[in-house]
Amino acid sequence: MYHLTALVTLLAIAFYFFTIMNVSRSRSKTGVKVPAISGHPDFERAFRIQANTLEWMPIVLPALWLFAIYIGDAIAAGIGAVWIIGRVVYFIGYSKAAAKRGPGFMIQGIAAIALWAGAIGAVVLRLV
Amino acid sequence: MYHLTALVTLLAIAFYFFTIMNVSRSRSKTGVKVPAISGHPDFERAFRIQANTLEWMPIVLPALWLFAIYIGDAIAAGIGAVWIIGRVVYFIGYSKAAAKRGPGFMIQGIAAIALWAGAIGAVVLRLV
Amino acid sequence: MYHLTALVTLLAIAFYFFTIMNVSRSRSKTGVKVPAISGHPDFERAFRIQANTLEWMPIVLPALWLFAIYIGDAIAAGIGAVWIIGRVVYFIGYSKAAAKRGPGFMIQGIAAIALWAGAIGAVVLRLV
């Protein structure tokens, strides 16, 4: 069983859900009404944080699970937790200014690539 | 085996696919050409319906499967079916007017949160 | 075990990751700065390639895995490989002009629908 990976998956989803809620909150604050997705720089940054987190979900979740299955539950969950931390740092930085989104983005990117690289390495080892 | 959860997953995907087709149809009707994603309020609502459904897929599908594995196939599939119904109601309402998107959104939101909450509760119980 | 399906999943993710990197590259080339997502037709096409690939991930990945589980690993991986090829053709065509996105889109669409149809057929056969 993959209890730790399951837990990290659900925490990653919870954080992503929070970025969605933050877009709604930003709509009220900035007055950008649905279905518009532009009109105020603060709203646009909140929207891009959520969109960018969404864009990485189909990379991170499958890589996380394949890593867990092919390598191990605890180490997959650990790298997955680093990904969430990177996303939190990205959220805080990008919420302040577009120029401050770098460090968090790099942390989450390295974690995602580590999950992907570990998984594909382990899969290829089984196939050859 | 999780036949019912598999079935609900494939039906959820089919409905989501329908929201994508509806964006294409709306492009022809309103004359908003690719790659533009704005220019006519009817198109923008069709686009936001699809985008919002997409945005919730990485919440619902993993939560649905973890719920199925940790709690049970039939109950997961039942809540997943409620999620699809909420999305259909949301589609019909939002297609008419942005102000009519509320009830469907709430139904799907409650179903998604129920899947998430059940799954994390069951995972934590196994871990402690 | 589903080694071939796992491999195709990770290759699909790698290609999708490449479409994300291409958006960043297009930002530098066209001068469209974050958080803006419009402003230059070349950038908008690069953005839509990535967005469209993202939009199909929640269709293709679950359908691919349910097909693999209910029908077989090698055939699922084969159709999944066709999907990736279709996406590459779509990327090359759409990068040149919006009008050239058709053939690749059709290849990937047929592969995705084949995965979905095979999976739901097999699931329904088990249920009845």
Image (cartoon, coloured by chain):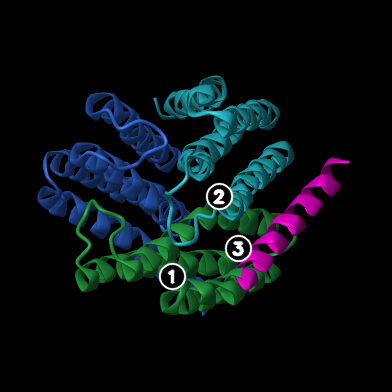
Chain colours: A cyan, B green, C blue
Separation of residues labelled 2 and 1 (CA atoms): 32 Å
Element under disc 1: helix
| Disc number for residue A30 | 2
Vertical side of C23 occupied by B89: above or below: below
Left or right, A31 with reference to A39: right
Q: Nearer the viewer, residue C23 or B70?
A: C23
Q: Is residue B95 above or below residue C50?
A: below
Task: Specify the amino acid type for callout 3.
Answer: Tyr
For label 1, the residue is B15
Query: Marks 2 and 1: which is nearer the front?
Result: 2
The chief SS type of the magenta part is helix
Horizontally, residue A109 falls left or right of residue B110, namely: left
Task: Identify the secondary structure beneath mark 3.
Answer: loop
The location of residue C17, given as percent across then percent down, is 38, 33
Q: Which of the two discs, 1 and 3, labels the residue nearer the N terminus? A: 3
10 Å crowding of disc 1: few (<14), some (14-19), many (20+): some
Which of the 4 quarters of the picture holds residue B95?
bottom left
Tell me the chain of label 1: B
| Residue at 19% across, 59% down | B33
Q: Amino acid at mark 1?
A: Phe
Tag of residue B2: 3
Q: Which residues are magenta?
A: B106-128
Q: Residue at x 47, y 37 (%)?
A: A59
- The answer to if B120 sits in the magenta stretch is yes
In x, y percent, where is residue C47?
A: 30, 41
Tell me, yes or no, whether dots 1 and 3 are on the same chain: yes
